[in-house]
Amino acid sequence: MQFTCLIYSAPNSGPQPGSPAFAAYMKAYGDFTKKVQDDGKFVSGEALQGVETATTVSVRDGKTETIDGPFAETKEQLGGYYLLDCADMAEAVTYAAMIPTADHGRIEVRPVVVWDS
């Protein structure tokens, strides 16, 4: 079963680029990625550019509308994700707790819908 681990944190809440702590933080991400790959759980995962690069799209009455930035103004922002293949939610949560941002942000774990064909 596949689960997305959506990685949320407030801007500037974790180690900042250029700081000694940031190198350790990025190494922890590399270590986590290697672990889920070695464990056969990794499907995909990527970091996202900042919310200032986002465009939100909606269609109303057949007209496409775009807004610069994310839809919701929140303190925590989506920074990336992992897509993991886990036995169940409990296993997915175990892996999500290992994601370095869990120490200062939040990891939202959601099952992926499997559509019947």
Image (cartoon, rainbow, N blue to C red):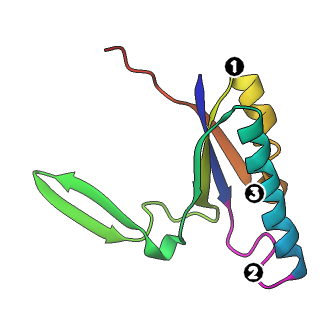
Question: Main structural element of the magenta stretch: helix, strand or loop?
Answer: loop
- Say which residue appears at 79% left-offset and 85% top-offset: 18
Mark 3: amino acid: Gly
Badge 2 crowding class, 10 Å Cα cut-off, few under 14, some 14 to 19, many 20 or more, is few
Callout 2: SS: loop
Q: Residue 96 sits in which quadrant?
A: top right
Which residue does the numbered mark 1 point to in the structure image? 87
Choose between 28 and 15: the one closer to the eye: 28
Mark 2: amino acid: Pro
Provide the residue span drawn in magenta. Answer: 9-19
Task: Give the answer, above or below, for where 91 lies relative to 64.
Answer: above
Which residue does the numbered mark 2 point to in the structure image? 17
Which residue does the numbered mark 3 point to in the structure image? 105
Mark 3 and mark 2 lie on one chain; the one further toward the N terminus is 2
User: Would you say 85 lies left or right of 31 here?
Assistant: left
Q: Are marks 3 and 2 in contact (CB under 8 Å)?
A: no
3D distance between C-alphas at marks 3 and 2: 17 Å
Q: Is residue 53 magenta?
A: no
Residue 17 percent coordinates (x, y)? 75, 80
Mark 1: amino acid: Ala
Q: Which mark is residue 46?
A: none
3D distance between C-alphas at marks 3 and 1: 25 Å
Mark 3 and mark 1 lie on one chain; the one further toward the N terminus is 1
